[in-house]
Image: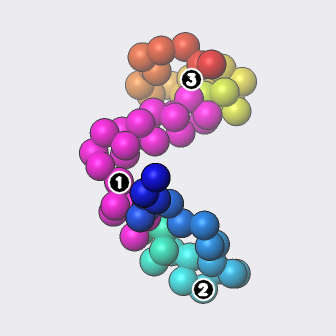
Amino acid sequence: MREDPRDEREWERGWEGHELAQRRRMARLTLAEKLEWLESAQRLVFHLRGGVRPAGGAEPTDPPR
């Protein structure tokens, strides 16, 4: 089984270099993966807000899980 080169097992220590490493990780994602990540983040925000949608904000296409 080949390892996915995007699968990083080593985390940065502290904040130095974190932003660059995060940008590199996001740059390696496909468009479909980025959209999936964004939808997941949207569901999380909706859940953390207790189901209250912001005024004028887009409604999620599917209910929170």
Give the Cα separation between the discs numbered 1 and 3. Answer: 28 Å
Amino acid type of the residue tagged 2 in the rendering: Glu
First in sequence: mark 2 vs mark 1: 2
As helix, strand or loop, the secondary structure at mark 1 comes to loop
Q: Is residue 30 left or right of residue 46?
A: left
Towards the viewer: 52 or 32: 32
Point out residue 43 in the picture as x, y percentages from the top left corner: 56, 29
Quadrant of the rendered image containing residue 38? top left
Residue 29: image tag: 1
Point out residue 26 in the picture as x, y percentages from the top left corner: 40, 60
Q: Nearer the viewer, mark 2 or mark 3?
A: 2
Residue drawn 46% across the image and 21% down it: 60
Above or below, 37 relative to 50:
below
Residue receiving disc 3: 53
**Identity of the residue furthest to the bottom in this view:** 16
Instruction: Estimate how packed mark 2 is, as few (under 14), some (14 to 19) or many (20 or more) residues with alpha carbons within 10 Å.
Output: few
First in sequence: mark 2 vs mark 3: 2
Q: Is residue 50 magenta?
A: no
Which range is magenta? 24-45
